[in-house]
Amino acid sequence: MACVLVVEDDPVIRAALIEVLTGHGYAVRTAHQGFEALREITQAPPDIVVLDLGLPDLDGLDVLRMIRGISRIPVLVATARDDDREVIRLLNAGADDYMVKPFSGGQLAARIAAVLRRSVPAGQARDRQPVVQVGDLRIDPLARTAHLAGRELSLTRREFDLLAYLAANADQVMSRRRILTEVWQQPYLEDQTVDVHLSALRRKLGERASRPRYLHTVRGIGIKLVTSP
């Protein structure tokens, strides 16, 4: 039975979500503040977090960023904010999906099931994603570490996901739309989302778009990570 941590400060909404999710076969734990949620995640990690943004102690976006600093647990954000810029901020901060209030309990349960299906258990991740060595670049998907010439790179969650995806498909040109679908799992995002993270990765790899070593842009087609200079 999958466990859902519901982070919601409104007791009426919280009770309704508990009823809906237990009715769909989920074990449910709750937190009504951001710091309480972080404590729950570190002490007894759930399978997924449903995160309301309007919390009394911390902004939900900050809570999301803190979660991503300590865990890869899937996070589904429940928000009343539906403008494109806010949605992009949430997804770039590490949300796996989002729902705009109000929504039905059935829709929430279906979204949770979809996010959980996309989540790969650690044992399977080891089988599917072996350590990749490309020149001086070493990427360990299970440990979520990347080293360049023996020095560990400080990467954000999305930067690592993008680098690991390109490395797993080395020497193949991957379109931005495919990257958004496979890495962000949000194909409708703007291509600029990929470019922002690509630019940050290049800086950390010590290269420039005009003089790439690993990350090459193929104009009009996409991006590839090359295995030889």
Image (cartoon, rainbow, N blue to C red):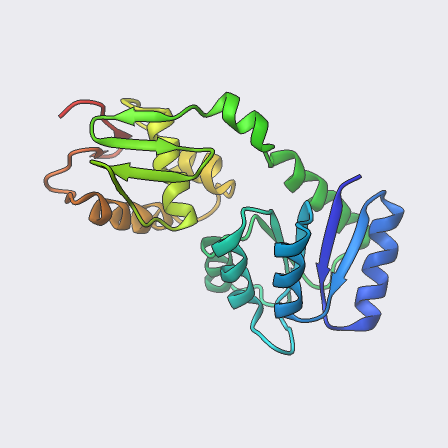
Q: Residue furthest left?
A: 211
- Disc tally is 0
Q: Residue at x 67, y 59 (%)?
A: 40
The quadrant of the rendering that contains the N terminus is top right
Residue 41's x, y, as percent? 64, 55
Q: Residue at x 27, y 22 (%)?
A: 171
Viewer can see residue 223: no
The quarter of the picture where the C terminus appears is top left
Where is residue 122 shown, x and y percent of the image?
57, 32
Determine which quarter of the picture holds residue 52.
bottom right
Q: Give the farthest residue toward the bottom.
A: 56
- Up the image or down, 161 lies above or below 35; here it is above
Is residue 75 left or right of 176 when viewed as pictured? right
Q: Is residue 122 left or right of residue 78?
A: left
Residue 159 in sight here = yes
Q: Position of residue 161 (x, y in %)?
A: 41, 40
Which quadrant of the structure image shows residue 13? bottom right
Query: Which residue does the image show at 46% across and 60% down from the upper left?
Result: 89
Q: Nearer the viewer, residue 186 or 15?
A: 15
* Residue 3 x/y as whole percent: 75, 46
- Residue at the image point whose x is 25% and y is 26% from the top: 134
